Amino acid sequence: MRIIAGTARSLPLKTPSGLDTRPTTDRVKETLFNILNPRLFGCHFLDLFAGSGQIGLEAVSRGAKKAVFVENNRKAAACIKENIEFTKFTEKCDLLVRDVVSAIRCLEGKETFGLVFLDPPYGKGLEQEALRALADSSLITEDTLLVLEAALDWDPSFARELGYAVVREKKYRTNQHVFLTRGGAEDTMGRGRL
């Protein structure tokens, strides 16, 4: 696993050993960041369920002003810390070692994010908890783009009930990225705000 573009291009990243993590492949990561690229430069990036931190670090490498990583597993958090130090992004990165809902509460009133990436374990309902906590927070605005990495059969109706709009879906062989905003019309074809 490595950073694929930007100031830290080609730097290898560590992954947590012995954990049930799903590192995003370079190909999927490239597709994701081709979509996110117009919004990246100078943004504040929130990486929830961060795993190794590779998505937030890729964002910083490509021009995000700051990334905040949230991971409650201590082994994974130690891996994120090592990756932040190795890429020399310590001035641009913060790591919160806690569960996502308490991290959202902790960040309340301190900043807002232009991009939020969520990669929760599948089938445990954690994305619902996170989306609900974000909807009730000041961390996101109508201009914030949220990207949820989800199983192919993920049902967006819960997100819609919370006031999110699905603005794009990008399906891969084994999973998908669902792009959400707090405002705007539904658009699963990828037009509109993306």
Image: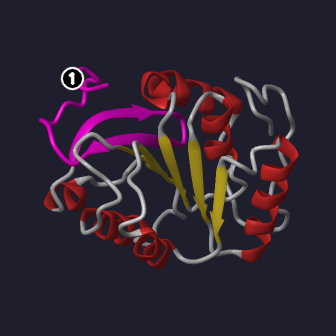
Instruction: Relative to 56, say whether 126 is above or below.
Output: below
**171 vs 128, nearest the viewer:** 128
Whole-percent x, y for residue 152 in the image: 42, 46
In the rendered structure, the answer to whether residue 155 lies left or right of residue 187 reads right
Task: Tell me the amino acid under the disc marked 1.
Answer: Gly
Q: Quadrant of residue 179?
A: top left
The residue located at (82%, 43%) in the rendering is: 88
Secondary structure beneath dot 1 equals loop
The way the protein has been coloured in the rendering is secondary structure
Number of labels in the image equals: 1
Q: In the image, 26: left or right of 192?
A: right
Query: What residue sits 24% from the left and 20% below the top?
Result: 191
Residue 32: where, in percent of width, then height?
Answer: 52, 30
Residue at 39% over, 67% down = 130
Foreground pick, 47 / 107: 107
Could you tell me which residue is drawn at 82 percent across and 41 percent down? 87
Which portion, as a residue range, is magenta?
A: 165-194
Which residue is disc 1 drawn over? 192
Percent across and percent down for residue 61 are 68, 32
In the picture, the quarter occupied by the C terminus is top left
Q: Is residue 187 magenta?
A: yes
Q: Where 93 sits versus 27, above or below?
A: below
- In this rendering, would 38 be left or right of 65? left
* Left or right, residue 148 beside residue 32: left
Tell me which corner region of the image, top left, top right, bottom left or bottom right, holds residue 15: bottom right
Q: Nearer the viewer, residue 26 or 87?
A: 87
Q: Quadrant of the N terminus?
A: top right
